[in-house]
Amino acid sequence: MTQVVVATAIMRNGQVLAQQRAFPSADAGRWEFPGGRVEPGESEEAAVVRECREELGVDVKTGQRIGPEVPLRNGMVLRLYTATLVDENAEPVAVEHSAVKWVGAGEIDDVPWLDADLAFLPDLTEIVRKD
Ligand code: C5P
């Protein structure tokens, strides 16, 4: 079966959360939407919740899937879900990454994203703009 990697666009007040990778060295310094591999028997929505807890220390509610399915190396595919913080006042922290930041719709295109994540920007910018 195809290994799905979920990525999460956490939205709050017209901004989306980006996190900066610390590893591997080829990706270090680039930004991504938080996420990771869906585990066997796990739903994609549940993987979003688990990964945000692990990587950011916050609880999220998974929203809708948006944008294309992006092929990754080794036959994996990347799918993006929107999400909102369960506690709007909770601040995500970079548990495994270098940094996190909130990005407004007008700044999304200026972030040095991982190549795979670039495919989501057109659909995402439209949704963040309406948030
Ligand atoms: O985070 P993790 O290593 O589990 O991610 C699996 C793969 O998905 C990695 O190759 C990573 O670079 C890629 N990925 C991505 N964009 C994301 C999240 C993960 O390209 N937003």
Image (tube, rainbow, N blue to C red):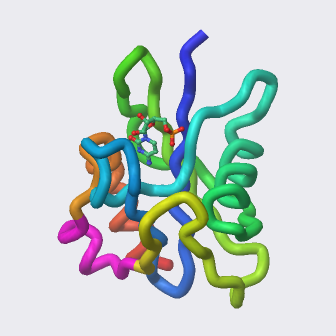
Q: Is residue 11 above or below residue 30?
A: below
Say whether residue 28 is left or right of residue 74: left
Q: Residue at x 45, y 56 (%)?
A: 33
Q: Is residue 87 magenta?
A: no
The percent position of residue 35, horizontal first and vertical second, equals: 56, 48
Residue at figure coordinates x 71%, y 29% from the top left: 39
x 34%, y 66%: residue? 125
Residue furthest right in the image: 41
Task: Name the quadrant containing residue 87.
Answer: bottom right
Magenta-span inclusion, residue 104: yes
Q: Residue furthest top?
A: 1
User: Residue 118, percent across and down?
Assistant: 27, 50
Q: Position of residue 126 (x, y in %)?
A: 36, 67
Q: In the shown orientation, is residue 9 left or right of residue 25?
A: right
| Residue 102 picture location, percent across and down | 44, 79
Give the quadrant of ligand 1: top left
Residue range corresponding to the magenta coloring? 103-111
Left or right placement of residue 79 versus residue 22 in this view: right
